[in-house]
């Protein structure tokens, strides 16, 4: 058996087209384009690549992109002042501060300073609380993108057993919240889980977000299960996910790396920015997104 390839790149292209249509509606009705501000501190080359592709995708969707590049030795005060300025700027609907920040900066203090209603990353504790309690807010882009792919593959997710490997605030925890919201039975596994292979073997769906190249093995997988690979590990052999590609022989469907979850992250970021602009301008979009 060879698993069906879940084409995140193609799904993301469709989502970006719907976002572009929505952005055109906001622009026509509110008289200005949705705006996304991206802040990059320091020169990490991988981060610079992401920021550039986010900027391009933003403009391609008919939105305004505001890029702020600050030197690696930027102080906490300077960065907080920039966040305050973006919070107050009516042209800015979404603010993303690229993580990780250089070590001397207090990441949590920066995230908490962003206006929760411009927090298109969904990292602010207010948005984490909204997600946990079922209130409207912003949901982190990567797990929301994974949920969209899973709904596309399975339709209704009710009653399915899902194992999320990883408990980060950015992926694992919000992924679990979203799946609970879709009536899945959710297990969150992590580095201290006992007998991970046995836990994973029960799952109809596995979401791997650990950051360890090819750690999920084919012997762990229930035949026919769906595998969502959030890992992006840079090795000498190129980009490798958290799921061993040999799992394709056992799984029913599987996201590739690259071309799976990564492109969804950027498309959902644009989607969240559009939703923010529509809410802030009181525009009702003609199709839900
Ligand atoms: N505040 C904040 N929000 C983020 O959303 C955020 C961040 N910080 N810091 C860095 C990570 C990483 N991230 C990715 C986005 C897209 C791809 C992506 O499109 N990957 C492609 C290509 C990968 C490649 O070739 O390098 C793929 O998987 O097919 C990957 C990674 C967003 N991040």
Image (cartoon, grey):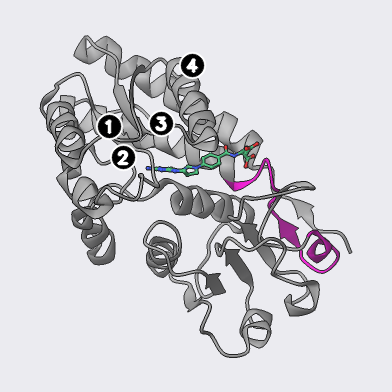
- Of the numbered discs 1 and 4, the one sitting upstream in the chain is 4
Q: Residue at x 68, y 55 (%)?
A: 241
Q: Is mark 2 within 8 Å of ligand 1?
A: no
Q: Position of residue 242 (x, y in %)?
A: 66, 61
Identify residue for label 3.
270
In which quadrant of the rendered image does the C terminus lie? top left
* 257 within the magenta span: yes
Give yes or no for contact between labels 2 and 1 (Cβ–Cβ under 8 Å): yes
Numbered badge on residue 120: 2
Numbered badge on residue 61: none
Cα distance, mark 3 to mark 1?
9 Å
Identify residue for label 1.
94
Is the residue marked by circle 4 packed among few (<14), some (14-19), or many (20+) residues within 10 Å? few
Q: Position of residue 240 (x, y in %)?
A: 71, 52
Is 190 displayed left or right of 94 in the figure? right
- Of the numbered discs 4 and 2, the one sitting upstream in the chain is 4
Q: Nearer the viewer, residue 212 or 205?
A: 212
- Kind of element beneath mark 2: loop
- Kind of element beneath mark 1: strand
- Of the numbered discs 3 and 2, the one sitting upstream in the chain is 2
* 6 within the magenta span: no
């Amino acid at each position: 058996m060879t698993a069906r390839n879940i084409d995140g790149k193609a799904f993301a292209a469709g989502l970006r087209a719907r976002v572009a249509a929505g952005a055109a509606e906001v622009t026509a009705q509110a008289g200005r384009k949705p705006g996304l501000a991206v802040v990059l501190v320091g020169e990490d080359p991988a981060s610079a690549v992401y920021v550039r592709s986010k900027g391009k995708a933003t403009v391609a969707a008919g939105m305004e992109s505001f890029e702020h590049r600050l030197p690696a030795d930027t102080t906490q005060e300077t960065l907080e002042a920039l966040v305050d300025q973006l919070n107050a700027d009516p042209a800015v609907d979404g603010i993303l501060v690229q993580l990780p920040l250089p070590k001397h900066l207090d990441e949590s203090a920066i995230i908490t300073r962003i206006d929760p209603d411009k927090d298109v990353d969904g990292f602010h504790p207010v948005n984490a609380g909204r997600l946990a309690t079922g209130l409207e807010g912003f949901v982190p882009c990567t797990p929301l993108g994974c949920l969209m792919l899973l709904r596309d593959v399975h339709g209704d997710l009710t009653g399915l057993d899902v194992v999320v490997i990883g408990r980060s605030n950015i992926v694992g925890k919000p992924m679990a919240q979203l799946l609970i919201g879709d009536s899945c039975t959710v297990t969150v596994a992590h580095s201290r889980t006992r007998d991970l292979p046995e836990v994973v073997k029960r799952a109809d769906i596995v979401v791997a977000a650990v950051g360890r190249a090819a750690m999920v093995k084919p012997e762990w997988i229930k035949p026919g299960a769906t595998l969502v690979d959030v890992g992006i590990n840079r090795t000498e052999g190129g980009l490798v996910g958290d799921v061993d590609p040999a799992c394709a022989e056992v799984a029913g469907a599987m996201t590739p790396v690259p071309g799976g979850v990564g492109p969804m992250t950027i498309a959902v970021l644009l989607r969240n920015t559009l939703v923010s602009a529509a809410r802030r301008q009181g525009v009702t979009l003609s199709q839900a997104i």
